[in-house]
Amino acid sequence: MKKLNRKINELWQRYRNWGKSSFVGDFTVSTMKIVFIAIAFLAIFQILSFVDPSEDKEQIIEDSSLVDSSEPVNDNCTVAGINIHGKIVTYVPEHAENDSLFDYDITASENVFWLIKSANGNEKIKAILVEVDSSGGYPVAGEEISNAIKNSEKPIIGFIRETGASAGYWAISSADKIFASKNSEVGGIGVTMSYLNNVEKNKKDGYLYEQLSAGKFKDAGNTDKPLTKEEKDLFMRDLNILYENFIEAVSQNRGLSVEAVKKFADGSTVLGDKAKELGMIDEIGGINEVEKYLEELIEEKPEICWE
């Protein structure tokens, strides 16, 4: 179509130029119009004979606002696949898309929430598969994913690959069934906020920390000042609360007693076989075993579409 438009414009310019010549003076205006129209139709016929229709079709598809990119490309999808990889956070900053220094190995809990919600709203989807390969992240982010999985109307199967630890394990612990390799690292139930103190290094380098803050604990935890006992007690208070919340969540999600969870909630991870023995996961297996289970669950061969 672009070629056609250019050709017509060229013909029109020629018509205008001819109108200024003495040659056209012998013709009437009506005769000139007939000549122009005839030439234009002849040009259109010649151009259309050489136009590749696929070119315009591709452009129409690209420009069409009717294409819904939120729908899976494969209309045969029966299982929605969602990845939880890397560090788990509540959101990804808007600047991240064009920030070359940003760590892209992250998963935002708000994105997982909407993917689960979308899968629940798609009548073609019969189950959801959540793959985890994460060493953790932030407590709230892990909790939000766990709650989204727990509240799903459709069954959610968890699949731990290399690692499902800390917030990564919290997130997937509420799945209806959890698979992991016998070599997967599972658990890591604990909370930390340890950091490197720069006070002595600053002294050596000649730096002096000037404290300017309103509120007794406002700059508590600043790496350039010593941590007082009172400040440390304050942080440990909150860490212990988060730790107890983590244990309680795993207890509820896995149907285990709090006492049972506390026995392996020492911050360490265990391998797959031990995790199954402790009730942290349900089955040992990889993607093949997961697909076989899904086939039994939905009573047909699963077609997994990864988001």
Image: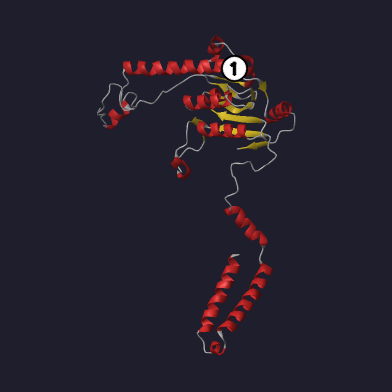
Residue that mark 1 sits on = 254
List x then y, in percent, for residue 1: 61, 64
Which residue is painted at 63% across and 21% down in the image? 272
User: Tag 1's secondary structure?
Assistant: helix
Which residue is nearer to you in this view: 166 or 20?
20
In the displayed structure image, the side of residue 211 where residue 14 appears, left or right: right
In the displayed structure image, the side of residue 221 where residue 294 appears, left or right: right
Amino acid marked by disc 1: Arg
List x then y, in percent, for residue 69: 59, 44
Which residue is painted at 52% across and 83% down in the image? 19
Above or below, 63 relative to 254: below
List x then y, in percent, for residue 114: 55, 34
Image quarter (top left, top right, bottom left or bottom right) of the C terminus: top right
Determine the image quadrant of residue 116: top right
Which residue is nearer to you in this view: 235 or 181?
235
Residue 266 visible: no
Residue 141 visible: yes
Residue farthest to the top, as pictured = 259
Which residue is painted at 32% across and 21% down in the image? 227
Q: How many marks?
A: 1
The crowd level at tag 1 (other Cα within 10 Å; few <14, some 14-19, many 20+) is some
In the displayed structure image, the side of residue 215 where residue 174 appears, left or right: right
Describe the colour scheme in one phrase. Answer: secondary structure
List x then y, in percent, for residue 217: 30, 22
